[in-house]
Image: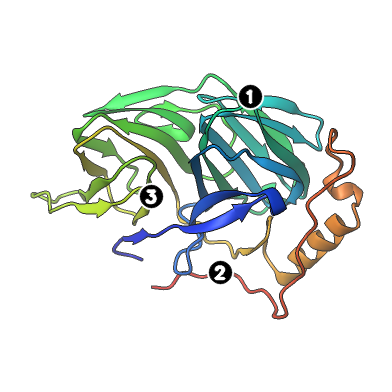
Amino acid sequence: MTQGAILEPRRVPLGGLRAIDVWRTLPHRDLPTIGAWCFVDHFGPTDDGMQVLPHPHTGLQTVTWPIAGNVQHRDSLGNEVILRPGELNLMTAGQGISHSEFSVGGGDMHGIQLWVALPDGARVGPGSFEHIDDLPRASGDGWDGIVLVGEFASQRSAAEVHSPLVGAEVRVQGGRAVLPLDPTFEHGLLAVTGAVRIIPHSRGSREVPPGELVAHRHLKYLPTGETSVVVETDDPVTLVVIGGEPFTEPLVMWWNFVGRTHDDIVAAREDWEAQTERFGHVDGHDGRVIPAPPMPALRLKPRTRQR
């Protein structure tokens, strides 16, 4: 992974029996995180509705960015909002939170949901929720975009994060665009619509090498040290750029939980199944929830990178 790679998506049903399919590129068997980003899901475009009953989270933040369609969010903190395209939901699980997500208003669904692994301290703190409808815009050589979290091209989002991160939607109208990168971050570029040629352009390189084609839904990983990346496309394309300082804390990830040890996960599952106060209650669903799957037979171990 040190020289970069293209991660292929896998299809995953989200939300139980009436699931909407998502395309998941992270975590990958060889790469558990990019910065602190530990999940990348891309759903749609589809006319299937999102119907995700209350379910729990620990040790992470969810970042939800709709491109088309409206989603009703309810959580155990008492928040209830309609999330629309151009707006961001950021939910911090801390030691435990639960929420539901349902499509409202009809029409196609299309969007991105990402998870951020919380560092020690924040991961055992209280849960919180932000709905942000005024995100900063950025632009540069051949592109324009919206900064979802962190800082990109000198524009900073108000969303609260707990480790050095960046997340941005970038639109390239066609031709060649040059995106600035923080060389202390590793990055991922997700092709949301269409295909693009990605050309890392490290500090000091005198010639731009041939581009690597990144297909729709695929994620291109870039290691630290890159100060910019060249993106070439024949047609208008939307990308999502994620990045951050490499996350060095051990991560045990299972179902909707992020912990440090197998025992962390077992305790979270038991608390959810017992419906303890840890995860609270989400109103509006007549007590219905998504049950946790059975634990695997083997002891869970932290995910590691395969060099």
The earlier-in-sequence mark between 2 and 3 is 3
Q: Name the residue under label 2.
A: 303
Q: Where is residue 242 in the image (x, y as percent from the top left)?
A: 43, 44
Is 39 or 34 nearer to us in this picture?
39
| Amino acid tagged 1 | Gly
Mark 1: secondary structure: loop
Left or right side of 253 for 30: left
Q: Name the residue under label 3.
A: 187
The earlier-in-sequence mark between 1 and 2 is 1
Q: Where is residue 128 in the image (x, y as percent from the top left)?
A: 72, 36
Q: Position of residue 211 (x, y in %)?
A: 18, 51
Quarter of the image with the C terminus is bottom left
Rounded to the nearest angstrom, the CA distance separating label 1 from label 3 is 35 Å
The correct choice, above or below, for 131 with respect to 13 in the image is: above
Q: Which mark is residue 304?
A: none
The earlier-in-sequence mark between 1 and 3 is 1
Q: Residue 105 carries which label?
A: 1
Applied colour scheme: rainbow
The correct choice, above or below, for 33 with respect to 140 in the image is: below
* Residue 299 appears in the figure: yes
Is 294 or 208 nearer to us in this picture?
294
| Amino acid tagged 3 | His
How many numbered dots are placed on residues in this image? 3
Q: Where is residue 219 in the image (x, y as percent from the top left)?
A: 38, 52
Residue at left 36%, top 25%? Answer: 138
In this rendering, the label closer to the viewer, 1 or 3: 1
